[in-house]
Image (cartoon, rainbow, N blue to C red):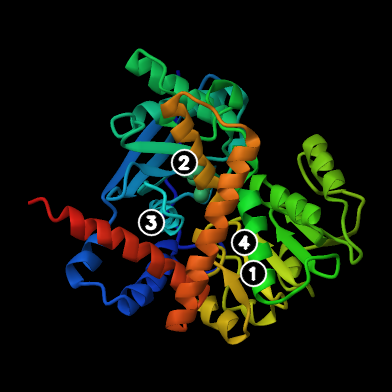
């Protein structure tokens, strides 16, 4: 059996925009911490991840060779409850990225007031080149590598970029085999047939639609076909956001995936685009409009922009050209810290990632509650409770922004950091 070592990639600073994701998170954290007059001791605690795990994951490839992949899991903060956050499979994964995403999960769970801390995981791999059985081996090996920290009371993963219900089922099974009994609540985003929640798959996109609707109302913009939406990314978040915003009555003028985008001035048929991608795995060749590039999509003449792909796509290089009045951050970290000020100066209302895409983890929380209670809710109950949390959280962040004269982003960090800090103060320091 030949062992092939995958070359360790040097720590990448960025995906696209030239900013280290952890520094980009900290830049906003610093502003919010200052506004809150956060005491230096707590500032120190909150700028350090609690635990960082790196595991080597040897996988038997179908070729008969063994390839060693690197996996990460970062538990950023668990003051408010078990660590919560997805796992991504991507060639852009670095420890710094996972740290930033774990911190964002901490703030995200706090913004919507879930009793969770924050975590994130990632494996540096290209899943598009792997067979289903290779992905299963990789997922199980990674799970066993991080099993000491996993558990319904300690760390609860979920899907993220390039992972889905199938992988969550393997994680649940691997963990349960080790525990010698079935533990559904160890992971969320599972298939409904094995303890998943109705509405979980659509939850992130549904949350994006709800906060966008609230933002349009706040700005007195119409909720009808005159409001034009461009969506970057057509995975779980982008496609469902487009679908639900279209159902709300808005006009979707552009969508894109990693192979580029499609634009139609008079509106796209989102259902047809979803059906096309289900069949062809890409939007490329979709006949409903004209081809555009991903960077053209960001600066299109539209009213609402939904970046729902990866980090750092809106930077100081293109922020000045953005024409949308509202940006709903479906992705985590799509805007670089240097672009924030430009967007604010232009008067664009940015619904920040930690609020905009919190619908996913909110229904993950519902799933965890249902698993632990052994009693499952109907979809209407899930959606009604999600609606309430998103509407209330939007109002809380908007209220903080108005009171302190800050952007929605800084306001969201302030709400979140304040909640986490308050729990630290109450718990005191174990020494
Ligand atoms: N990966 C999603 C996120 O970034 C969901 C996390 C979860 O449900 O735990 O919010």
Q: Residue furthest left?
A: 431
Foreground mark, 3 or 4, reads 4
Task: Tell me the number on the disc at residue 211.
Answer: 4
Is the residue marked by circle 1 packed among few (<14), some (14-19), or many (20+) residues within 10 Å? many
Q: Quadrant of the N terminus?
A: top left
Disc 3 vs disc 2: Cβ atoms closer than 8 Å?
no
What residue sits right under mark 3 in the picture? 103
The tag on residue 354 is none
388 or 32: which is nearer to us? 388
- Disc 4 element: helix
Residues under numbered marks 3 and 4 in contact, where contact means CB atoms less than 8 Å apart: no
Q: Position of residue 308 (x, y in %)?
A: 64, 56
Whether residue 275 sits left or right of residue 213 in the image: it is right
Q: Which mark is residue 365?
A: 2
Q: CA–CA distance between discs 3 and 1?
A: 25 Å
- Of residue 253 and residue 314, the one placed in the foreground of this image is 253
Percent across and percent down for residue 33 are 32, 73
- CB contact under 8 Å: marks 4 and 1: yes
Q: Nearer the viewer, mark 3 or mark 1?
A: 1
Q: Position of residue 340 (x, y in %)?
A: 53, 77
- Whether 191 is drawn above or below 406: the answer is above
Residue under circle 1?
215
User: Pointer 2 and pointer 1: residues touching (CB < 8 Å)?
Assistant: no
Closer to the chain start, of discs 4 and 2, is 4
Residue at image position (57%, 59%) is 391
- Compare marks 3 and 2 and give the one earlier in the sequence: 3
Residue 333: tell me if it is visible: no
């Amino acid at each position: 059996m030949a062992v092939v070592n995958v070359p360790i990639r040097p720590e990448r600073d960025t995906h696209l925009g030239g900013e280290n994701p952890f520094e980009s998170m900290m830049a906003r954290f610093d502003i919010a911490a200052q506004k809150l007059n956060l005491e230096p001791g707590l500032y120190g605690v909150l700028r350090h991840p609690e635990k960082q795990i790196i595991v080597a994951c040897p996988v038997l490839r179908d070729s008969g060779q063994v390839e060693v992949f690197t996996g990460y899991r970062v538990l950023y903060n668990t003051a408010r409850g078990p660590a919560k956050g997805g796992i991504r499979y991507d060639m852009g994964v670095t420890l710094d990225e996972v740290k930033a995403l774990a911190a964002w999960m901490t703030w995200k769970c706090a913004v919507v007031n879930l009793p969770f801390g924050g975590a994130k995981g990632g494996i540096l791999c290209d899943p598009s080149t792997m067979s289903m059985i290779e992905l299963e081996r990789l997922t199980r090996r990674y799970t066993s590598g991080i099993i000491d920290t996993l558990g319904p009371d300690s760390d609860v993963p979920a899907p993220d970029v390039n992972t889905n219900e199938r992988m969550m089922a393997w994680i649940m099974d691997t963990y349960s085999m080790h525990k010698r009994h079935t533990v559904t609540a160890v992971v969320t985003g599972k298939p409904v047939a094995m303890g998943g929640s109705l509405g979980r798959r659509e939850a992130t996109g549904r949350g994006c639609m709800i906060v966008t609707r609230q933002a349009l109302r706040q700005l007195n913009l119409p909720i009808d076909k005159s409001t034009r939406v461009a969506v970057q990314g057509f995975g779980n978040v982008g496609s469902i956001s487009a679908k639900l915003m279209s159902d709300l009555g808005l006009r979707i003028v552009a969508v894109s995936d990693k192979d580029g985008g499609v634009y139609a001035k008079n509106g796209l048929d989102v259902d047809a685009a979803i059906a096309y991608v289900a069949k062809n795995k890409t939007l490329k060749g979709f006949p409903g409009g004209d081809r555009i590039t991903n960077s053209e999509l960001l600066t299109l003449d539209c009213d609402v922009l939904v970046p729902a792909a990866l980090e750092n796509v809106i930077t100081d290089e293109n922020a000045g050209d953005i024409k949308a009045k509202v940006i709903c951050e479906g992705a985590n970290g799509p805007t670089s810290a240097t672009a924030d000020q430009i967007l604010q100066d232009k008067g664009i209302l940015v619904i920040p990632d930690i609020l905009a895409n919190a619908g996913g983890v909110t229904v993950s929380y519902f799933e965890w509650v249902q698993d632990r209670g052994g009693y499952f809710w109907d979809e209407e109950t899930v959606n009604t409770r999600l609606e309430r949390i998103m509407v209330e959280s939007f109002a809380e962040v908007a209220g903080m922004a108005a009171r302190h004269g800050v952007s929605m982003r800084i306001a969201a960090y302030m709400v979140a950091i304040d909640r986490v800090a308050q729990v630290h103060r109450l718990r005191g320091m174990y020494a």
